[in-house]
Image: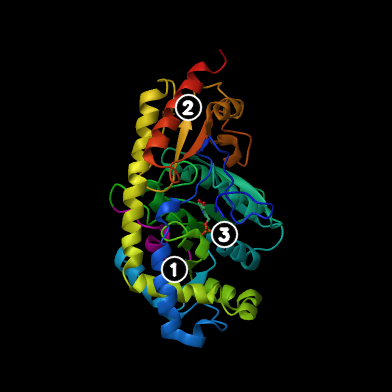
Amino acid sequence: MNPTSTPARPTLQIALTPGTIDLAWGHPAAEFLPVAAMQRASTAALQRYGAAALTYGHPAGPGPLLDWLCQRIGQREGRTPGLHEIMITGGNSLGLDQLLTLCTVPGDIVLVESPTYHLAVRILRDHPLTLVPVPADGDGLQVEALAETLAELRREGKRARLLYTVPTFHNPTGISLSAARRQTLIALAEREGLLIVEDDVYRELAYDGPPPPSLWSQAPLGVVARLGSFSKSLAPGVRLGWLTASPSIIRRLTDGGLLDSGGGINHFTALIVTLLCESGDYDAGVAQFCNTYRARRDALLGGLAQALPPTCSWYRPSGGFFTWVILPTGMNSRALLPQAEAAGVSFIPGPKFYLEPRGENTLRLAFSYYPPASLAEAGQILGNVIRNFGR
Ligand SMILES: Cc1ncc(COP(=O)(O)O)c(C=O)c1O
Protein backbone atom coordinates (compact mmCIF):
# COMPACT_ATOMS: atom_id res chain seq x y z
CA MET A 1 0.00 0.00 0.00
CA ASN A 2 1.16 3.49 -0.72
CA PRO A 3 1.25 4.92 2.83
CA THR A 4 0.07 8.35 1.71
CA SER A 5 -2.98 7.06 -0.15
CA THR A 6 -6.39 7.40 1.48
CA PRO A 7 -8.17 4.06 1.38
CA ALA A 8 -11.65 3.62 2.87
CA ARG A 9 -10.06 3.17 6.29
CA PRO A 10 -7.13 5.59 6.29
CA THR A 11 -3.84 4.72 7.95
CA LEU A 12 -2.45 8.22 8.17
CA GLN A 13 -3.57 11.68 9.25
CA ILE A 14 -2.15 13.34 6.15
CA ALA A 15 -4.29 13.43 3.01
CA LEU A 16 -2.68 15.04 -0.01
CA THR A 17 -4.24 16.21 -3.25
CA PRO A 18 -2.17 15.01 -6.21
CA GLY A 19 -0.67 17.95 -8.08
CA THR A 20 -0.86 20.31 -5.08
CA ILE A 21 2.13 21.40 -2.99
CA ASP A 22 0.26 21.36 0.27
CA LEU A 23 2.03 23.59 2.78
CA ALA A 24 -0.86 23.27 5.23
CA TRP A 25 0.57 20.12 6.82
CA GLY A 26 3.15 20.54 9.56
CA HIS A 27 4.38 17.00 9.07
CA PRO A 28 7.95 15.66 9.16
CA ALA A 29 10.07 14.83 6.12
CA ALA A 30 8.81 11.29 5.55
CA GLU A 31 11.98 10.15 3.81
CA PHE A 32 14.07 10.94 6.92
CA LEU A 33 11.91 9.22 9.50
CA PRO A 34 14.21 6.69 11.24
CA VAL A 35 12.84 3.38 10.00
CA ALA A 36 16.12 1.42 10.18
CA ALA A 37 17.13 2.91 13.55
CA MET A 38 13.73 2.02 15.03
CA GLN A 39 14.09 -1.49 13.67
CA ARG A 40 17.50 -1.88 15.35
CA ALA A 41 16.26 -0.35 18.59
CA SER A 42 13.16 -2.60 18.67
CA THR A 43 15.31 -5.71 18.41
CA ALA A 44 17.72 -4.36 21.02
CA ALA A 45 14.87 -3.47 23.41
CA LEU A 46 13.42 -6.96 23.21
CA GLN A 47 16.86 -8.46 23.71
CA ARG A 48 17.65 -6.29 26.70
CA TYR A 49 14.29 -6.23 28.44
CA GLY A 50 12.55 -9.42 27.20
CA ALA A 51 9.12 -9.82 28.76
CA ALA A 52 9.65 -6.65 30.83
CA ALA A 53 9.30 -4.70 27.58
CA LEU A 54 5.88 -6.17 26.99
CA THR A 55 4.19 -5.85 30.35
CA TYR A 56 2.69 -2.79 32.11
CA GLY A 57 5.21 -0.06 32.79
CA HIS A 58 5.76 2.38 35.62
CA PRO A 59 3.27 5.28 35.66
CA ALA A 60 6.03 7.91 35.29
CA GLY A 61 7.60 6.03 32.36
CA PRO A 62 10.62 3.72 32.26
CA GLY A 63 13.55 4.75 34.47
CA PRO A 64 16.22 4.37 31.76
CA LEU A 65 14.44 6.82 29.45
CA LEU A 66 13.90 9.29 32.29
CA ASP A 67 17.60 8.98 33.19
CA TRP A 68 18.64 9.62 29.59
CA LEU A 69 16.32 12.62 29.31
CA CYS A 70 17.50 14.09 32.63
CA GLN A 71 21.10 13.86 31.54
CA ARG A 72 20.41 15.42 28.15
CA ILE A 73 18.21 18.19 29.54
CA GLY A 74 20.86 18.95 32.17
CA GLN A 75 23.58 19.17 29.50
CA ARG A 76 21.56 21.23 27.06
CA GLU A 77 19.57 23.46 29.38
CA GLY A 78 21.82 23.82 32.40
CA ARG A 79 19.14 22.51 34.71
CA THR A 80 18.58 18.84 35.47
CA PRO A 81 15.06 17.81 36.46
CA GLY A 82 14.96 16.34 39.96
CA LEU A 83 13.85 12.74 40.47
CA HIS A 84 10.20 13.74 40.79
CA GLU A 85 10.22 16.61 38.31
CA ILE A 86 9.85 14.62 35.09
CA MET A 87 7.57 12.00 33.58
CA ILE A 88 6.97 10.42 30.18
CA THR A 89 3.88 11.52 28.26
CA GLY A 90 2.21 10.28 25.12
CA GLY A 91 3.41 13.39 23.28
CA ASN A 92 2.47 17.01 23.88
CA SER A 93 -1.13 16.59 22.82
CA LEU A 94 -1.83 13.94 25.42
CA GLY A 95 0.37 15.69 27.99
CA LEU A 96 -1.63 18.90 27.55
CA ASP A 97 -4.90 17.02 27.77
CA GLN A 98 -3.79 15.27 30.98
CA LEU A 99 -2.65 18.56 32.51
CA LEU A 100 -6.01 20.13 31.73
CA THR A 101 -7.91 17.10 33.01
CA LEU A 102 -6.09 16.94 36.32
CA CYS A 103 -5.02 20.54 37.01
CA THR A 104 -8.10 22.55 36.02
CA VAL A 105 -11.72 22.56 37.14
CA PRO A 106 -14.74 23.44 35.00
CA GLY A 107 -15.04 27.17 34.41
CA ASP A 108 -11.35 27.90 34.97
CA ILE A 109 -9.87 30.71 32.92
CA VAL A 110 -7.02 29.66 30.64
CA LEU A 111 -4.96 32.31 28.87
CA VAL A 112 -3.85 31.48 25.36
CA GLU A 113 -1.29 33.28 23.26
CA SER A 114 -2.96 34.38 20.05
CA PRO A 115 -2.19 33.39 17.32
CA THR A 116 -1.51 29.90 18.62
CA TYR A 117 -1.29 26.26 17.59
CA HIS A 118 -4.83 25.69 16.35
CA LEU A 119 -4.99 22.04 17.42
CA ALA A 120 -4.00 22.90 20.99
CA VAL A 121 -7.09 25.10 20.95
CA ARG A 122 -9.08 22.02 19.99
CA ILE A 123 -7.65 20.19 23.03
CA LEU A 124 -8.38 23.19 25.25
CA ARG A 125 -11.93 23.30 23.92
CA ASP A 126 -12.43 19.64 24.81
CA HIS A 127 -12.45 20.90 28.40
CA PRO A 128 -15.09 23.13 30.03
CA LEU A 129 -12.72 26.10 30.32
CA THR A 130 -13.00 29.79 29.50
CA LEU A 131 -10.27 30.70 27.00
CA VAL A 132 -8.93 34.25 26.97
CA PRO A 133 -6.58 35.34 24.18
CA VAL A 134 -3.38 37.29 24.85
CA PRO A 135 -1.87 38.97 21.77
CA ALA A 136 1.56 38.15 20.35
CA ASP A 137 3.73 40.12 17.93
CA GLY A 138 7.10 39.74 16.20
CA ASP A 139 8.82 39.22 19.59
CA GLY A 140 6.28 36.63 20.73
CA LEU A 141 3.71 36.92 23.51
CA GLN A 142 3.07 40.52 24.55
CA VAL A 143 3.85 40.26 28.23
CA GLU A 144 2.53 43.76 28.94
CA ALA A 145 -0.81 42.78 27.47
CA LEU A 146 -0.72 39.66 29.64
CA ALA A 147 -0.16 41.82 32.73
CA GLU A 148 -3.12 44.01 31.71
CA THR A 149 -5.33 40.97 31.19
CA LEU A 150 -4.38 39.59 34.60
CA ALA A 151 -5.09 42.99 36.22
CA GLU A 152 -8.44 43.23 34.49
CA LEU A 153 -9.39 39.72 35.61
CA ARG A 154 -8.41 40.65 39.17
CA ARG A 155 -10.63 43.75 39.03
CA GLU A 156 -13.49 41.42 38.06
CA GLY A 157 -12.67 39.16 41.01
CA LYS A 158 -11.34 36.42 38.71
CA ARG A 159 -8.03 34.56 38.36
CA ALA A 160 -6.47 32.71 35.47
CA ARG A 161 -5.47 29.10 36.15
CA LEU A 162 -2.75 28.85 33.51
CA LEU A 163 -1.23 30.25 30.34
CA TYR A 164 -0.64 28.07 27.26
CA THR A 165 2.27 29.32 25.16
CA VAL A 166 4.75 28.11 22.51
CA PRO A 167 7.72 30.41 23.18
CA THR A 168 10.30 28.65 21.00
CA PHE A 169 9.93 28.29 17.19
CA HIS A 170 6.26 29.04 17.47
CA ASN A 171 3.48 27.36 15.55
CA PRO A 172 2.16 29.11 13.44
CA THR A 173 4.59 32.06 13.24
CA GLY A 174 8.04 30.47 13.68
CA ILE A 175 8.92 33.26 16.14
CA SER A 176 10.74 32.78 19.44
CA LEU A 177 9.89 34.86 22.49
CA SER A 178 12.61 37.46 23.03
CA ALA A 179 15.08 37.02 25.90
CA ALA A 180 13.80 40.15 27.66
CA ARG A 181 10.19 39.00 27.45
CA ARG A 182 11.13 35.54 28.76
CA GLN A 183 12.44 37.16 31.93
CA THR A 184 9.46 39.48 32.41
CA LEU A 185 7.02 36.66 31.70
CA ILE A 186 8.60 34.41 34.31
CA ALA A 187 8.69 37.22 36.88
CA LEU A 188 5.06 38.13 36.17
CA ALA A 189 3.88 34.51 36.38
CA GLU A 190 5.72 34.03 39.66
CA ARG A 191 4.25 37.22 41.12
CA GLU A 192 0.73 36.35 40.00
CA GLY A 193 0.83 32.64 40.86
CA LEU A 194 0.11 31.83 37.20
CA LEU A 195 1.19 28.41 35.88
CA ILE A 196 2.90 28.68 32.49
CA VAL A 197 2.33 25.65 30.28
CA GLU A 198 5.28 25.81 27.89
CA ASP A 199 4.76 23.79 24.72
CA ASP A 200 8.37 23.12 23.73
CA VAL A 201 7.76 20.71 20.87
CA TYR A 202 10.26 22.28 18.40
CA ARG A 203 13.25 22.81 20.76
CA GLU A 204 15.53 20.29 19.03
CA LEU A 205 14.90 21.72 15.54
CA ALA A 206 17.18 24.78 15.75
CA TYR A 207 18.80 25.92 12.50
CA ASP A 208 20.84 29.02 13.37
CA GLY A 209 22.60 27.99 16.56
CA PRO A 210 21.27 26.77 19.89
CA PRO A 211 17.62 27.43 20.73
CA PRO A 212 16.69 30.04 23.35
CA PRO A 213 16.66 28.67 26.90
CA SER A 214 13.35 27.12 27.87
CA LEU A 215 11.15 29.05 30.27
CA TRP A 216 11.24 25.95 32.48
CA SER A 217 15.03 26.07 32.79
CA GLN A 218 14.97 29.74 33.81
CA ALA A 219 12.00 29.84 36.15
CA PRO A 220 11.75 29.02 39.85
CA LEU A 221 10.34 25.57 40.57
CA GLY A 222 6.58 25.37 40.04
CA VAL A 223 6.17 28.36 37.72
CA VAL A 224 6.46 26.41 34.44
CA ALA A 225 5.20 23.02 33.28
CA ARG A 226 7.15 22.26 30.11
CA LEU A 227 5.91 19.78 27.51
CA GLY A 228 8.68 18.20 25.42
CA SER A 229 8.11 15.73 22.61
CA PHE A 230 9.83 13.13 20.45
CA SER A 231 7.37 13.94 17.67
CA LYS A 232 9.47 16.50 15.82
CA SER A 233 12.97 15.30 16.74
CA LEU A 234 12.38 11.57 16.17
CA ALA A 235 8.96 10.56 14.82
CA PRO A 236 5.39 11.57 15.66
CA GLY A 237 4.23 7.97 15.32
CA VAL A 238 6.04 6.98 18.53
CA ARG A 239 3.57 9.13 20.49
CA LEU A 240 6.07 9.93 23.22
CA GLY A 241 7.10 13.04 25.05
CA TRP A 242 7.96 14.24 28.53
CA LEU A 243 6.79 16.76 31.07
CA THR A 244 9.15 18.69 33.34
CA ALA A 245 7.24 20.37 36.16
CA SER A 246 6.99 20.64 39.93
CA PRO A 247 6.79 17.37 41.87
CA SER A 248 3.20 18.21 42.85
CA ILE A 249 2.09 18.44 39.19
CA ILE A 250 4.04 15.33 38.21
CA ARG A 251 2.52 13.46 41.16
CA ARG A 252 -0.98 14.65 40.23
CA LEU A 253 -0.54 13.16 36.74
CA THR A 254 1.31 9.96 37.67
CA ASP A 255 -1.19 9.27 40.46
CA GLY A 256 -4.09 9.79 38.05
CA GLY A 257 -6.29 6.92 36.95
CA LEU A 258 -5.08 6.91 33.36
CA LEU A 259 -1.46 6.05 34.17
CA ASP A 260 -2.35 3.85 37.12
CA SER A 261 -4.69 1.73 35.02
CA GLY A 262 -2.54 1.72 31.89
CA GLY A 263 0.87 1.34 33.53
CA GLY A 264 2.43 4.46 32.01
CA ILE A 265 2.08 5.58 28.41
CA ASN A 266 3.43 3.55 25.50
CA HIS A 267 5.78 1.49 27.68
CA PHE A 268 7.18 -0.72 24.89
CA THR A 269 7.72 2.21 22.56
CA ALA A 270 9.40 4.13 25.39
CA LEU A 271 11.90 1.29 25.85
CA ILE A 272 12.59 1.17 22.12
CA VAL A 273 13.19 4.91 22.11
CA THR A 274 15.48 4.50 25.14
CA LEU A 275 17.72 2.15 23.16
CA LEU A 276 17.60 4.40 20.13
CA CYS A 277 18.65 7.39 22.23
CA GLU A 278 21.42 5.50 24.01
CA SER A 279 22.83 4.21 20.69
CA GLY A 280 23.51 7.70 19.32
CA ASP A 281 20.93 7.28 16.56
CA TYR A 282 18.73 9.95 18.14
CA ASP A 283 21.43 12.61 17.99
CA ALA A 284 22.35 11.62 14.44
CA GLY A 285 18.69 11.87 13.42
CA VAL A 286 18.27 15.30 15.01
CA ALA A 287 21.35 16.55 13.13
CA GLN A 288 19.95 15.19 9.87
CA PHE A 289 16.55 16.75 10.49
CA CYS A 290 18.15 20.11 11.25
CA ASN A 291 20.19 20.05 8.04
CA THR A 292 17.15 18.99 6.05
CA TYR A 293 14.77 21.55 7.50
CA ARG A 294 17.31 24.36 7.32
CA ALA A 295 17.67 23.75 3.58
CA ARG A 296 13.88 23.58 3.22
CA ARG A 297 13.35 26.80 5.16
CA ASP A 298 15.93 28.53 3.00
CA ALA A 299 14.34 27.22 -0.20
CA LEU A 300 10.89 28.44 0.78
CA LEU A 301 12.09 31.82 2.03
CA GLY A 302 14.21 32.19 -1.11
CA GLY A 303 11.14 31.48 -3.25
CA LEU A 304 9.07 34.01 -1.28
CA ALA A 305 11.79 36.65 -1.55
CA GLN A 306 11.92 36.21 -5.31
CA ALA A 307 8.22 36.08 -5.97
CA LEU A 308 6.16 37.92 -3.38
CA PRO A 309 5.38 41.61 -3.98
CA PRO A 310 7.09 44.12 -1.64
CA THR A 311 3.74 44.72 0.08
CA CYS A 312 4.08 41.25 1.68
CA SER A 313 6.33 40.31 4.57
CA TRP A 314 7.12 37.11 6.47
CA TYR A 315 9.11 35.89 9.44
CA ARG A 316 12.45 34.12 9.16
CA PRO A 317 12.18 31.26 11.68
CA SER A 318 15.37 29.99 13.35
CA GLY A 319 13.78 26.62 13.97
CA GLY A 320 10.60 24.58 13.75
CA PHE A 321 8.38 23.93 10.75
CA PHE A 322 6.66 27.19 9.83
CA THR A 323 6.78 30.66 8.46
CA TRP A 324 4.03 33.24 8.65
CA VAL A 325 3.22 35.50 5.76
CA ILE A 326 1.61 38.92 6.21
CA LEU A 327 -0.29 39.96 3.10
CA PRO A 328 -1.09 43.55 2.20
CA THR A 329 -3.80 45.05 4.44
CA GLY A 330 -7.19 44.24 3.01
CA MET A 331 -6.08 41.06 1.24
CA ASN A 332 -7.97 38.12 2.75
CA SER A 333 -6.06 34.83 2.99
CA ARG A 334 -9.30 32.83 3.09
CA ALA A 335 -10.32 34.34 -0.23
CA LEU A 336 -6.81 33.75 -1.58
CA LEU A 337 -6.81 30.04 -0.70
CA PRO A 338 -9.08 28.68 -3.49
CA GLN A 339 -7.07 30.61 -6.07
CA ALA A 340 -3.81 29.30 -4.64
CA GLU A 341 -5.16 25.76 -4.64
CA ALA A 342 -6.31 26.11 -8.24
CA ALA A 343 -2.73 27.14 -9.07
CA GLY A 344 -1.27 24.17 -7.14
CA VAL A 345 -0.37 25.42 -3.62
CA SER A 346 -2.23 25.13 -0.35
CA PHE A 347 -1.75 26.72 3.09
CA ILE A 348 -3.71 27.48 6.24
CA PRO A 349 -5.29 30.96 6.40
CA GLY A 350 -4.22 32.93 9.48
CA PRO A 351 -7.64 33.34 11.17
CA LYS A 352 -7.57 29.62 11.96
CA PHE A 353 -4.85 30.32 14.57
CA TYR A 354 -6.62 33.10 16.45
CA LEU A 355 -9.17 32.73 19.22
CA GLU A 356 -10.68 36.08 18.29
CA PRO A 357 -11.67 37.20 14.76
CA ARG A 358 -8.26 38.44 13.55
CA GLY A 359 -5.49 37.68 11.10
CA GLU A 360 -7.45 37.99 7.82
CA ASN A 361 -4.34 39.08 5.94
CA THR A 362 -2.04 36.35 7.30
CA LEU A 363 -1.30 32.74 6.43
CA ARG A 364 0.87 29.88 7.64
CA LEU A 365 3.26 27.93 5.42
CA ALA A 366 4.93 24.68 6.56
CA PHE A 367 8.32 23.95 4.99
CA SER A 368 8.93 20.58 6.70
CA TYR A 369 7.36 18.07 4.34
CA TYR A 370 8.46 18.93 0.80
CA PRO A 371 11.93 18.94 -0.79
CA PRO A 372 13.59 22.29 -1.55
CA ALA A 373 12.66 22.36 -5.25
CA SER A 374 8.94 22.02 -4.47
CA LEU A 375 9.17 24.71 -1.81
CA ALA A 376 10.88 27.15 -4.15
CA GLU A 377 8.19 26.39 -6.74
CA ALA A 378 5.46 26.92 -4.13
CA GLY A 379 6.92 30.36 -3.39
CA GLN A 380 6.77 31.25 -7.07
CA ILE A 381 3.18 30.04 -7.43
CA LEU A 382 2.08 31.90 -4.34
CA GLY A 383 3.77 35.05 -5.61
CA ASN A 384 1.86 34.84 -8.90
CA VAL A 385 -1.45 34.23 -7.16
CA ILE A 386 -0.94 37.17 -4.79
CA ARG A 387 0.11 39.49 -7.61
CA ASN A 388 -2.97 38.54 -9.63
CA PHE A 389 -5.40 38.49 -6.71
CA GLY A 390 -8.48 40.60 -7.33
CA ARG A 391 -7.51 41.42 -10.91
C1 LIG B 1 3.03 23.65 18.95
C2 LIG B 1 2.71 22.20 18.84
N1 LIG B 1 2.40 21.52 19.94
C3 LIG B 1 2.11 20.21 19.91
C4 LIG B 1 2.11 19.51 18.72
C5 LIG B 1 1.76 18.07 18.73
O1 LIG B 1 2.73 17.41 19.49
P1 LIG B 1 2.70 15.87 19.78
O2 LIG B 1 2.87 15.14 18.49
O3 LIG B 1 3.85 15.68 20.72
O4 LIG B 1 1.39 15.57 20.42
C6 LIG B 1 2.44 20.18 17.53
C7 LIG B 1 2.42 19.47 16.24
O5 LIG B 1 2.30 20.04 15.20
C8 LIG B 1 2.74 21.55 17.60
O6 LIG B 1 3.05 22.25 16.50
Q: Are there few (<14), some (14-19), or many (20+) residues within 10 Å of tag 2?
A: many
First in sequence, mark 1 or 2: give its number. Answer: 1
Disc 3 element: helix
Q: Is residue 325 magenta?
A: no
Can I make out residue 70 in this image? no
Looking at this view, is 332 or 388 the one in front? 388
Can I make out residue 282 in this image? yes
Looking at the rendered structure, the kind of residue marked 2 is Leu
Mark 3 vs ligand 1: CB under 8 Å?
A: yes
In the rendered image, the vertical position of residue 368 relative to residue 70, given as above or below: above
Decide whether the magenta segment is chiefly helix, strand or loop: loop
Query: Which residue is pictured at 60% across the width and 39% down the height?
Result: 352
The residue wearing badge 1 is: 221
Q: Are there few (<14), some (14-19), or many (20+) residues within 10 Å of tag 1?
A: some
Q: Quadrant of the C terminus?
A: top right
The residue wearing badge 3 is: 93
The residue wearing badge 2 is: 382
